Amino acid sequence: MPYTPGANWQYDVPTTGSTHLPPDAGYGKALTNQGYGFEVAVADLIDNSIDAGADKVVVHFLRDASRILTLLIIDNGKGMDEEGLDAAMTVGRRRDYGEGALGMYGTGLKAASLSHASSLTVVSRTRRSRAAGRRLTAEGIEDGFRCDTVDPRYAQDLVDRYDGIIEWQGTVVRWDGVRSFETVGRGQSDQFLSKAIARLETHLGLYLHRYLQNDLKLDIAVWDVSSGDSLGEEVDHIAVEALDPFGYKVPGKAGYPRKFTAPVEGVGDVQLTAHIWPAKSKQAGFRQIGSLTARQGFYFYRNDRLVQAGGWNGLRNPEGHLVLARIAVDLPARANSVLSLDVKKENVTVTPAFTLGVEKAVDSAGHTFSGFLADAEAAYRDGSRRTEIVRKAVTPPGKGLDPKIKRVIKEELPEKADEEPISFTWGSLPPDQFFALDRASNTLILNKTYREDFNDGRRGGVNDAPVTKTLLYLLLEDCFGLGRWERGRQDKVDYWNTILLASVDAQRARRAQAAS
């Protein structure tokens, strides 16, 4: 209908046609500055692996003697053919997501990757297609969104290198030119990786805990490619364990958890599962996922993936006496205008309709949500009055000890502040030494001559001989971080070595007898 000047101007804007305006190449700058944290970006890529049906994912750091080279994420999902790769690497293309998918906006792969790396390569194969790959770079985006085709021989070689994960199908995502890696000074790679992996392990263990508690196997590995072996040598390996923010053994108050129903206008009934942690709990799901004050409040899930870990979303301010209060909320399956998730899947924005509904929430027995908050506060105050035995702080264990053991040590013993973790390695030592201490680098060295004796005749992996290493840690932890080295302490180290060597001889004698 032609526009009549002055008519209905306040209700509608008339148009006379349209034109398509493709994004300018300068959009690449915005794409690479989305504010993704490193752990958040990696988690976003693993979401894609889960959507592809993967039950095995490895986050793989490659390094050489002096620097960190690149990061790869490998999965055994259904993979992509050439057409699928083109679609995945098209900036701004949104695919159709299934009802239970973790992906939402179609930008995560590109935005998360290019926020940290100058080059993103994806190599994949399906059961019916050969290995193929695409590479997207910041320069390519500026050059009219150019995407490079990976040499098929390289694509096949890369898939073959990870045949322990990718059998008939799977995907490798590779980051090159990772900006945080390039800022690591010479000789600082070990320290950087130790801290980066610890943060990544905690983040993935928390935000993917429901998947890890089911079928997902998620590992973080470090390979040194400077060795003579063409594949390199594995120097660290961590199996990521679930960090359940509701994983207490006994609740902080009898009768919990309780399921409340909140009437939320615009959504309908929203289920709230309210939990009260036991006071002063040392469990990893309570203590090791960040500040207790920040972690109180709502835990929003979307399709079993945690997308917000704590916070009150305007209902109230965080308070010390509510640190035991946590509420699990599964977001409704259908889109709505009340609860919206940000692109990075880190935070949920709510309108006042949600908080008003929470204030009216009740459970089947008539208990109110405000009563839950009062119970959580009472449990905290009761716990604060109990006296607690204060255990001596220790230097934490580091690389070379099984992560499950490290987590229990962390739960049981407070850590010394700003102390480098004690790492474990097998090295060349004289035959009259079972172990040696390198106190300058906080390293406990075990004699590699005896390695097979504690691994049932096998070489073992990075985190092998867990009982032996744990006992040595408990014996020797207080030998690190000291000032003057006393003569009596050296004498203990000497006779511990002698006694442990006798245990090795006894172990070998038993093995020989069993074999005869």
Image (cartoon, rainbow, N blue to C red):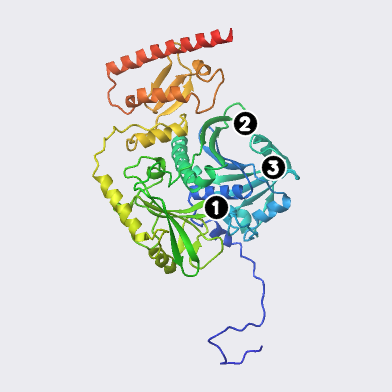
**Residue type, label 3:** Gln
> Which quarter of the rendering shows the C terminus?
top right
Residue in view at x 39 percent, y 44 percent: 286
Residue in view at x 39 percent, y 65 percent: 360
Q: Determine if residue 116 is in view.
A: no
Q: Nearer the viewer, mark 3 or mark 2?
A: 3
Q: Which residue is mark 1?
A: 112
Describe the element under mark 3 as helix, strand or loop.
Answer: loop
Q: Position of residue 292 (x, y in %)?
A: 35, 48
Residue in view at x 61 percent, y 27 percent: 229
Q: Which residue is mark 3?
A: 169
Q: Position of residue 138 (x, y in %)?
A: 59, 54
Instruction: Tell whether 17 sits left or right of 198.
Output: right
Q: Nearer the viewer, residue 471 or 33?
A: 471
Going from N to C along the chain, the mark reached first, 3 or 1, is 1
Disc assigned to residue 231? 2
Check the image and report above or below for 10 versus 390.
Answer: below
How far separated are the C-alphas under marks 2 and 1?
A: 28 Å
How far separated are the C-alphas under marks 3 and 2?
A: 21 Å
Instruction: Tell whether 211 sits left or right of 321.
Output: right
Q: Determine if residue 135 is in view.
A: yes
Disc assigned to residue 292? none
Describe the element under mark 2 as helix, strand or loop.
Answer: loop
Pointer 2: residues within 10 angstroms few (<14), some, or many (20+)? few
Q: How many marks?
A: 3
- Asked if the residue at tag 1 contacts the one at tag 2, i.e. Cβ–Cβ closer than 8 Å, the answer is no
